[in-house]
């Protein structure tokens, strides 16, 4: 995982979410609703692994427990009336950056048009399914904040490995723990039991390599990512732009 400087991206994303916290919570709530429906209506994370993953993500994003409870009650209600479809788009940003967009929508045509527009507006282009996903690995990613420097690297690494992590990457102000998607919930629960808290916790598409951009293309890429971030239908955007 050397070179996967995740915290730089997390800091930017977290700052954007802090400014638009309600929108971020709405996107997480949408994921919960779909997880409950696809899990046969199970609102207990012990019996719904996908829901457990999303609740871990919600807590890392500081979503209040009362909010989580209300969303689960709504999802369990037969009259919620909401039906979302998960769709993944792939394409290229400025400078050939590989981009994966995960959307959740109740109107496929609307979302497809919006995603295409976001790609086109700043010199990117929407591609066919599979055009870039081959260059990403799906992994559980748990970011442990160490901004204050209170945590010992060797201790955190040993704890992470004892909890079943696949890989561990220290950075300047955080530690990133990688898992297989199947082991994500178990590792997150085990680290939580050891009193660790997460700055970010979710299943991610981790790039195998990174692309550096010129200042001009970097500015376009920033603006394109902002469009995706502001789109209510877009849940996550993954890319291999080296932002260092």
Image (cartoon, grey):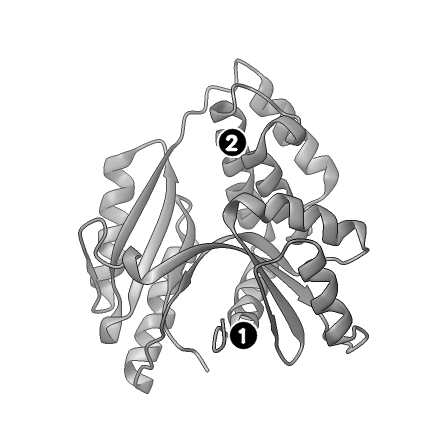
The percent position of residue 180, horizontal first and vertical second, equals 52, 51
Q: Residue at x 29, y 42 (%)?
A: 111
Q: Nearer the viewer, residue 90 or 4?
A: 4
In the rendered structure, the answer to whether residue 75 lies left or right of residue 217 reads right
Q: Quadrant of residue 136?
A: bottom left
For disc 2, the marked residue is 35
Q: What label sits on residue 8 in the rendered view?
A: 1
In the rendered structure, the answer to whether residue 53 lies left or right of residue 121 reads right
The percent position of residue 194, horizontal first and vertical second, equals 81, 55
Q: Nearer the viewer, residue 34 or 83?
A: 34
The percent position of residue 128, horizontal first and vertical second, equals 18, 51
Q: Secondary structure at mark 1?
A: helix
* Viewer can see residue 58: no
Q: Residue at x 58, y 42 (%)?
A: 53
Could you classify mark 1 by the number of other residues whose Cα lies within 10 Å: few (under 14), some (14-19), or many (20 or more)?
some
Q: In the picture shown, does residue 72 fall above or below 124?
A: above
The percent position of residue 124, horizontal first and vertical second, equals 22, 65
Q: Quadrant of residue 8?
A: bottom right
Outermost residue toward the top in this view: 78
Q: Residue at x 23, y 72 (%)?
A: 96
Q: Earlier in the sequence, mark 1 or mark 2?
A: 1
């Amino acid at each position: 995982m050397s070179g996967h400087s995740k915290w730089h991206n997390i800091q930017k994303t977290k700052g954007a979410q802090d400014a638009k916290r309600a929108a971020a919570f709405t996107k997480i709530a949408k994921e919960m609703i779909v997880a409950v429906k696809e899990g046969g209506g199970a609102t207990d994370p012990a019996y719904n692994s996908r829901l457990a993953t999303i609740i871990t993500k919600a807590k890392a994003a500081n979503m209040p427990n009362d909010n989580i409870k209300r969303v689960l009650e709504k999802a369990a209600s037969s009259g919620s009336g909401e039906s979302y479809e998960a769709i993944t788009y792939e394409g290229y940003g400025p400078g050939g950056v590989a981009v994966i967009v995960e959307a959740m929508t109740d109107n496929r045509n609307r979302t497809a048009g919006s995603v295409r527009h976001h790609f086109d507006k700043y010199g990117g282009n929407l591609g066919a399914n599979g055009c870039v996903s081959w260059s990403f690995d799906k992994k559980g990613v748990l970011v442990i904040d160490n901004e204050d420097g209170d945590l010992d690297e060797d201790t955190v690494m040993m704890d992470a490995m004892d909890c079943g992590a696949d890989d561990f990457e220290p950075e300047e102000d955080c530690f990133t723990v990688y898992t297989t998607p199947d082991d994500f919930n178990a590792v997150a629960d085990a680290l939580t039991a050891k009193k660790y808290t997460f700055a970010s916790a979710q299943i991610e598409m981790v790039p195998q390599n990174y692309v550096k951009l010129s200042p001009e293309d970097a500015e376009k890429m920033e603006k394109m990512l902002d469009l995706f971030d502001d789109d209510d239908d877009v849940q996550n955007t993954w890319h291999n732009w080296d932002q260092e």
